[in-house]
Amino acid sequence: MLTFTYIKTKIINGDFMITETERLFLRELTKDDFSALYSVLADSDITQHYPYTFDKARVMNWIDKSIERYNIFGFGLWAVCLKDNGEMIGDCGLTMQIINNPIKPEIGYHFRKDMQHKGYAKEASIAVRDWTFINTPFNSVYSYMKKDNIPSAAVAVSYGCKKLDEFIDSENETTVVYEITRTEWGKIKI
């Protein structure tokens, strides 16, 4: 089993930060994030590509699963917060996902509706991409989504991914896979 450790060096608004951007900081989710996360995941427009809707139990399970991932892997989906006031506006992070059978490191993201179309998803995903290549040995990182989830695909492209594959998933829908390699990332970072 892979486990990674990282140093949480800065504190913003009393929270230990994993990584930061010009406008955002990412930190581990806690049970105190329930209301903020519920406003993201319970919005059927945001989760329209999921096979189920998020009720209170599923949102709490999401948080519990994230905390479990931090303990097992040293990473997971992190709370995305605005630097200017500490408000949590979504989540973004690295998880291990089964993508067309193999397990792969995947950057996922979910943002509150009023925080979309402001560049936050791109900004947070770039931070997670950089964190991944700096702090893990993974040579590629992926994002995957339903083929008709155009906004999510646009975020993957915006952080440097290229379309790698598509396949028919367990819901009999087409899923598209995007990838960026460590080598490609190195060329972007120069």
Image (cartoon, rainbow, N blue to C red):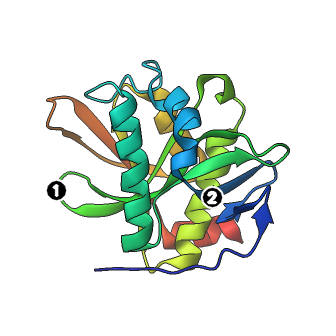
Give, as a three-letter code, the residue at label 1: Asn
Task: Name the image quarter holding residue 173.
Answer: top left
Mark 1 nearby-residue class (10 Å; few <14, some 14–19, many ≥20): few
Distance from the alpha carbon under mark 1 to that under mark 2: 30 Å
Residue linked to disc 2: 27
Camera-nearest label, 1 or 2:
2
Compare marks 1 and 2 and give the one earlier in the sequence: 2
> Residue 67 at what x, y percent from top left?
43, 60
Quadrant where the N terminus sits is bottom left
Q: Residue at x 46, y 80 (%)?
A: 4
> Residue 35 at what x, y percent from top left?
56, 33
> Residue 149 at what x, y percent from top left?
41, 28
Which SS class for mark 2?
A: strand
Is any atom of residue 179 visible in this view? no
Q: Which mark is residue 47?
A: none
Residue linked to disc 1: 101
Give whichever of 79, 93 is nearer the camera: 79
Do the numbered discs 1 and 2 sit on residues whose CB atoms are within 8 Å?
no
Q: Residue furthest front?
A: 32
Please tell me how many numbered marks the rendered image carries: 2
Q: Residue furthest right?
A: 84
Q: Taking 115 as reference, is 137 left or right?
A: left
> Residue 25 at what x, y percent from top left?
72, 55
Give whichever of 138, 85 is nearer the camera: 85
Which SS class for mark 1?
A: loop
Task: Name the image quarter holding residue 95.
Answer: bottom left
Is any atom of residue 46 visible in this view? yes
Classify 13 as above or below 62: below
Q: Residue at x 34, y 30 (%)?
A: 147
